[in-house]
Image: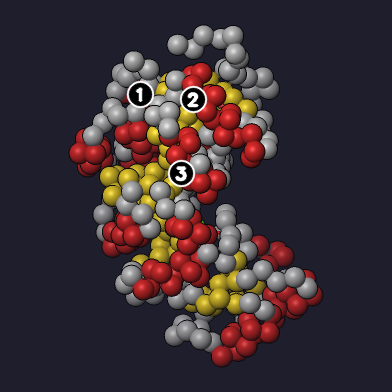
Amino acid sequence: MTNKIWLMEGLSSQRDLIQGIRAFANLKQTDVTVIASHRNERHEILSQADIALTEPQDADDRLAFILATVKKLGVKAIHTGRHATWFEAHRAAITASGVTLTTGSLQPAMFELADDKVEYAHAMEKAGLPVVPSLRVESVDELRALIARSPFASKSLCVKPVKGIYGMGFWRFDENVSPMAHFINPDSRKVNARFYLSALEQAGKFEPLVLMPYLPGPEYSVDMLVEDGAVLAAVGRRKEGSVQYLENHGEAFELAKACARLMKADGLVNVQTRNTTSGKPLLLEINMRPSGGIGYTRLSGVNLPGLFAFRQLGLMSQQDVLDEAERAFTPAVVRPLTEAVNYPTALTNRYREENDHE
Ligand SMILES: Nc1ncnc2c1ncn2[C@@H]1O[C@H](COP(=O)(O)OP(=O)(O)O)[C@@H](O)[C@H]1O
Ligand SMILES: [Mg+2]
């Protein structure tokens, strides 16, 4: 019997998924083959798999490529970290051969909801989940007026793009910082609103923004293994300065799980929250995919990518995963570092037609 799982193009976390799955298979002394593919030459990711493939550049060629690869290699499970909407639109054609498919949710409407931070906030509010108060801003004049009348209980305001990623475009308004503050220390994410408004005006082009009260934190980032809304395993990271505390209980942790349930998440997903001044967690966002920090969660003893793979390959039951997540967890304090790895200029594991991978 062959246990072959295929991780298609994702963000940088694709590498952590491959490594997590291989480590878990080793630990469980189970033969698992990890196939990885990407459109680009991401050797630092692809080199980690047993078999590497290059994905077609053109979306029109994707379905034929998937079907041919599943057949040739005998793939049992596919995970994608990108193009989730495309994959869901082609679910029936992809899974007809018997392969499982994980995109983040079986309901494509949920991708749109997760993608629009204001729509998302409104949906959470409607469902009774505490979420950061979020106002959609459509123009510079609107932003100027809102800042002037301070629409929230808190005077401290911040903005981010309605459709953003990697924290890009998040700025906190502070009247007390120097006009140079954001140039000298961009990482502090503080800007005097006058200069922000002036730059926005002169840019001419306006991308919709979310205006929110600034939440002091701490921030939580919770990675989860979910099956059509049922959370099987989760590891929370409480971020305090440069260190992160791995946890599996508490109000933020429970709120994150409730959000994943409500959003009908399916696969490895991530929910972020931040605490108010009074210590109450509010939802910030859900990512219907593994977070960039999913690799850190393994330091708790719970291997989310491994558990995911074993579920998809039919090697563990839902109850097995629930038990393992409970048993394996140990609280840990971790510190993320940027590390360098040897970059393989050539791949030795690239799939070739004539190879026999059985
Ligand atoms: N209302 C807020 N108060 C304080 N910090 C915030 C707030 N909203 C966002 N942030 C900060 O900005 C970061 C990015 O916001 P997030 O909603 O996660 O968007 P994305 O990660 O998609 O860019 C968060 O991790 C958090 O540190
Ligand atoms: Mg985020």
**Which residue is at the far bottom?**
149
Q: Secondary structure at mark 3?
A: loop
Indicate yes or no: mark 1 CB to ligand 2 under 8 Å: no
Cα–Cα gap, marks 1 and 2: 21 Å
> Horizontally, is 200 left or right of 307 in the view?
right
Q: Is residue 284 visible?
A: yes
Residue at image position (56%, 76%) is 136
Nearer to us: label 3 or label 2: 2
Q: Tell me the kind of residue under disc 1.
A: Ala
- Identified by mark 2, the residue type is Val
Kindly identify the residue that appears in the image at 39 percent across and 29 percent down.
98
Compare marks 1 and 2 and give the one earlier in the sequence.
1
Above or below residue 75? Residue 213 is below
Residue 35 locus on image (x, y percent): 50, 25
Q: Does residue 17 appear anywhere in the picture?
A: no
Residue at figure coordinates x 59%, y 25% from the top left:
53
Which residue position holds label 2?
A: 70
Mark 3 burial class by Cα count in 10 Å: few <14, some 14-19, many 20+:
many
Q: Which residue is mark 3?
A: 103
Contact between labelled residues 3 and 1, with CB atoms less than 8 Å apart: no
The spot of residue 178 in percent (x, y) is: 69, 75
- Sooner in the amino-acid sequence: mark 3 or mark 2: 2
Left or right, 166 with reference to 253:
right
In the figure, 37 relative to 263: above or below?
above
